Amino acid sequence: MSFNQMVRKMIRHDARKYIFYLVCNSLAVMLFFIYAALFYNDDVTKAKMAETIQYALIIPGIALIVFTVFFISHAHHLFIKSRKREFGLFRTLGMTNRDVVKLLVMENGLIACLSIITGLLSGLLFSRLFFSLLTTVLNIQTISYGLNVQMFAATIMVYLLVFATAVGRTLYMILTQNLILTLKSDRVGEVVKLNSPLLGGIGAGLIIFSVAGLYLTYTGNQGDDYIFIWMILTMVGLYFSINQLSSLLIKMVKKSKRMYYKNLLSLSSLDYKFKQLTSTLMLVSVMIMVTVLYSTIVLFTYLDTARQIEERHPYDLAFLQTAEKNQLTEEQLYSIVDTEENHVQAHDTLPVFTFFQEDEYAGWISTFHLVSVQTFNQITSNSIEVKAGEYIFHPNQPAADPDGAYEFQLKFEGKAPAQSYIQDDTFVQSTLNYLGGEFILVNEEDFDALKTHLNGFDATMNFINVADWKSAFEVTRNLEAAFAAVNQRTPSVTSEADEGTSDERLFSVASKMEDAAINRQTDGLTFFVISFLSVLFLIGSFVILYLNLFSNIEKERLRFSNLHRIGVTVPEIKKAIAKELIPVFFIPTLTGITLALLYMIAMATDIGGILQNPDVLVNFAVIAGVYFILQIGFYFYSKWRMVAAVVKGF
Amino acid sequence: MPILEAGNIVKVYGESGQEHSTTALKGLDLSINKGDFIAIMGPSGSGKSTLLNILSGMDQPTSGVVTIKDEKISELKGDDLALFRRRELGFIFQDFNLLDSLTVKENIILPMVLEGKSADEMDKRAVYLSGLFGIESILNQYPYQISGGQQQRTAVSRALVNEPGIILADEPTGNLDSSSSAAIMECFEKVVEELSTTVILVTHDVFAASYSQRVVFLQDGAIHSSIQKQGSRESFLKQIIDHQRTFGGASHVF
């Protein structure tokens, strides 16, 4: 039997270990490729130039790179721990260092090649699946799936870099380490490492510092520039604190002997597990954080946009009509708008006088609608009063400062009235669908008098509600087409030279349907990217936790079977498994959710602070709750699987 | 009054009567009194380990009854059996079977922990047993930091911690050098003399067997013979070696 044959035989015997190692590596490659497929997607790249979604990609990008580094090193470490003893044995039997290096490099080289192939193939499959699923579910047409060289190159490069580093480190250790230690490596590896609550404290301090730092720097547009620094600091802090958390807990529990002895089995195993699983738990915490944070952003954006659409459109659709423009007879209009499945529920009209006026400071032409406050009150159920000779400026839009006094001065070019008009108040709010201009509210008598002094035309605002606006997209489009056909035949009422006003703007249909559609396409990309990442990270966190728990299943089996031999009952074993799994599952969940909350509070300064947007907190609670329930389900599933695997054959 | 009685124990591996079935024990009877120190010896494949596994309830006999302290353990199932083992029996294994994640002291008190005893009780017991077996100085060390002999003494302490009636040891000196073996066997002597606990030992080590009071020889799944200790350990050792020679010779008559 040649040496090569012997090696092959050993590989067959340890097939499980090799397969596990391969699966871990392929998984890392796959996840990274799926991310790369998004990051280097042509549509996303274009949008990145505009920097609208840059921020959405930063945190997951860092998390994923750190993930790749830790996950691969960890898998490699697990794998090599069991192989090291064999290498030690080979060397005692007279194998040279050269042979060891050759064997290791060949073995790992093969694993790397296979991992890249399987990882890329599964990555291709899943990214494709992801894209089509999400574009269908979210109904987004602005992003299309595509492949390019960069995706493959980046994935392979990052993977090989990380993998080669891990292998190089092992080579160095094996060649320099004492032979006896190598032989005993299977057991020495279990030595409880550095115990230092101080280090844990520093870790916790780092987390607080990074969140505070994010909070202070995340103002305005520069926030994104620093976010990656804070993210890295948070991860480092998290690593140390998780690493030391168990020591701290045990130290505390040890103060009560009764408590300590009562939980002896699970506590010691916890300490041992936590040290071993530190990197995994940190990664899972971060992934949960990203998932929860991003899902909250997605949900908030979605609901907030829907809310804004509702708010800005008290009526489902609205349009401005003059003697010539948008001129359809009642019959023509209803033949389009009033359909069998979707009847018109309300049709209100508001006579206005539309006029143009140059902005004093900016110099551009703006459009205004002069309206009698009495008719305005009727349609909006308001009770605003305007005295004769006065007027109220009503922008009909939500403003940054709702209490601000916006000044507006009526100007009369050449045909000034005898009486002067003064601004009484500003009424900043969104009351009616916005139809190309702001409102000037005046007394009914002044309405007729003022018309003659202003440069404009009589018009009627039409406001229509249908039974179900969500199914009236087609109606809106048909109406617009009909208007366009009519308007083509009549001369323009606005000055062509000015960009601020145009017939198109003034006579467009302001509808919920149109806004919702526009929104889905423009914000859709960000929405898509964020949803994509949160789903990716959700799946990723589950898979990592599961793989890690079950990589040690043989050892766990042996441990529990030893316990069974000295009289530990099966229910006691089940209880011990549950006690050991609970922290492994729920500490990262709680940590991740807490971090997500802190990050969200910090990032909410962008939209005026968390207190101004209590909805964010509600959305967050929903997402965190859903995640928690998912994790509980996952915990029960894993426990069930673990108990089955451990207890089998007792 | 015997503490352990085994009547007509038969153990067949595989389907009885089938071509591939192996009969490991052929209707074996054994009676052990409280305070006995018995060694079971025999060549490989004679059924020593099978017998010990059945006596301890880890394995079920194909037929026959094992009674320990008036409890028919061959009829106990699942968790009742586990609880019975934990309370009435102590086990010692060739490979020590300690948990690497626990210190020596924690390993010793583990069965008490499972019984939910008070912390004071556990501390006292750990101090007493470690003192008895000379491992008090390593109580806070981990298994991988101490020698094989120390690990086995830890295992002996663990086996005794719940004050069982019977200690069952499967090749306890199999992984130890001669001086560690002697130390362990002296531990067993103490167990019998000072704690009046019954010890049943399976071994192929004549030196270890010479510490017992009676040696039962197994051959082909049945008791071949047994010899009782009379006089000093040295003379008993000689007696066992002599007996084994004739006995061993008998199996090679061709």
Image (cartoon, grey):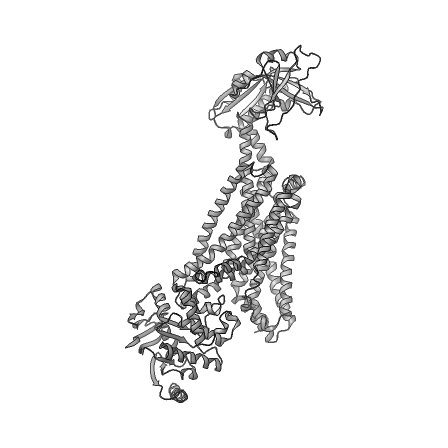
Q: Is residue A609 left or right of residue B165?
A: right
* Above or below, comparing residue A69 to residue B147 in the picture: above
Q: Is residue A498 left or right of residue B211?
A: right
Rendered location of residue A577, percent (x, y) = 44, 59
Rendered location of residue A605, percent (x, y) = 60, 39
* Above or below, comparing residue A499 to residue A554 in the picture: above
Specify the quadrant of the image occupied by residue A353.
top right
Residue toward you, A267 or B10: A267
Quarter of the image containing the N terminus of chain A?
A: bottom right
Residue toward you, B76 or A425: A425
Question: Can I make out residue A2 in this image?
Answer: no
Quarter of the image containing the C terminus of chain A?
A: bottom left
* Above or below, comparing residue A271 to residue A150 in the picture: below
Residue toward you, B130 or B151: B130
Rendered location of residue B226, percent (x, y) = 34, 84
Rendered location of residue A466, percent (x, y) = 49, 25
Query: Hey, which residue is sitting farthest top in the picture?
Result: A418
Specify the quadrant of the image occupied by residue B233.
bottom left
Residue ID at (48%, 80%): B180
